[in-house]
Image (cartoon, rainbow, N blue to C red):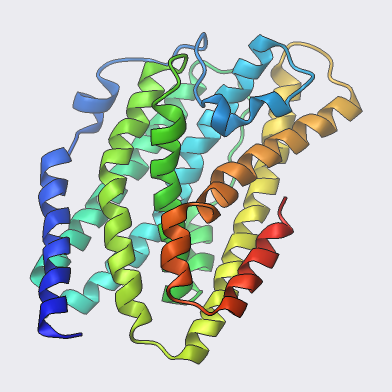
Amino acid sequence: MNAIEKISQTDRYARCVQTSKRVRWDIDKDVIRGRRFDAAHKFLPDGLSLVEAFTTLSADEKRFVSQIQGRTYANIFGLVERFINAKVLELSHDHWFGDQVALEALVRFSDEELKHQALFRRIDAMIGEVLPNGYRFDIDPNGVAHAVLGKSTWAVLALTLDVELFTQLHYRESIDRDTDLSELFKDVFLYHWREESQHAILDELEWLRHDAEISAEQRDRAVNEFIELVAAMDGILQAQAKSDAGYFTATCGRTVGEAEARAIEAAFLKAYRWQYIHSGAKHPHFGEVLSGLITEKQGQRIQTALATLH
């Protein structure tokens, strides 16, 4: 990297620091503000919950589905931010005795991710106050983090950028536009989006920096590991779709037959795969960055893997 490129990258890190200072928020003072969730409102918008796939449900039942999915949505983000934060702290080591602006940007990134995890734990508890008992999210974030961090840095950063970009897409194109959503739920993801916008920039900078330091053979193995991480995420989604569908059928207030129960579970899984896999894989900027780092054959391997998850 020449001197001009280094200055340009430092400037991008500096802009992230400046924005982090400007948009910084507090969980209680800015987001929750003494409010509670109201079960009369939807939590996730139709464009994310894919509620029209739940063809046998009434309008009230579809609202309940949006609330279950909204609770899981918060929990999934809390889950992935555990390994993202650990990787960011690891990457910060590369800047300890170098670019101090980049170091500050990553330290702020880590601090914000810790705050987000705390926010999502609060949201899970608050939603639990207004929904029926019996909801379960039994996925261990530390266990997932250990498994993810066992993969190469390249693969972890690829997955992280994917997550951070679809987070922004979900807010701008679905959550912000739906006037029927809980205002508290919308605010949670408004404030989350404001900080995640900088995280995506930083992750891309770190991914490109790391990519420049590895061999073609290492990158090829990392592509396989990225595919493995996506498959592992799908396993998590399958388990949670089964759990959430079971919770719905047990608490919706009517008898649900076996065939309908299977259809409801399939609809949950379809929604979760859209939310956490396909919406990110189809993000134009993610595709642009990824294609700039890999070969056509490697891209085909990824697309083939994704096609099995429809």
Q: Is residue 303 above or below residue 18?
A: below
Which image quadrant for residue 300?
A: bottom right
Q: Quadrant of the N terminus?
A: bottom left
Which image quadrant for residue 47?
A: top right
Residue at horizontal 49 percent and vertical 53 percent from the top: 141
Q: Nearer the viewer, residue 302 or 138?
A: 302
Total tally of numbered discs in the picture: 0
Position of 193 with respect to 131 (left or right) is: left
Q: Is residue 20 above or below residue 97?
A: above
> x, y (%) of residue 14?
11, 60
Residue at horizontal 32 percent and vertical 55 percent from the top: 200
Q: Is residue 67 above or below residue 83?
A: above
Residue at horizontal 61 percent and vertical 43 percent from the top: 274
Q: Is residue 48 above or below residue 140?
A: above
Position of 159 with respect to 210 (left or right) is: right
Residue at horizontal 36 percent and vertical 66 percent from the top: 87
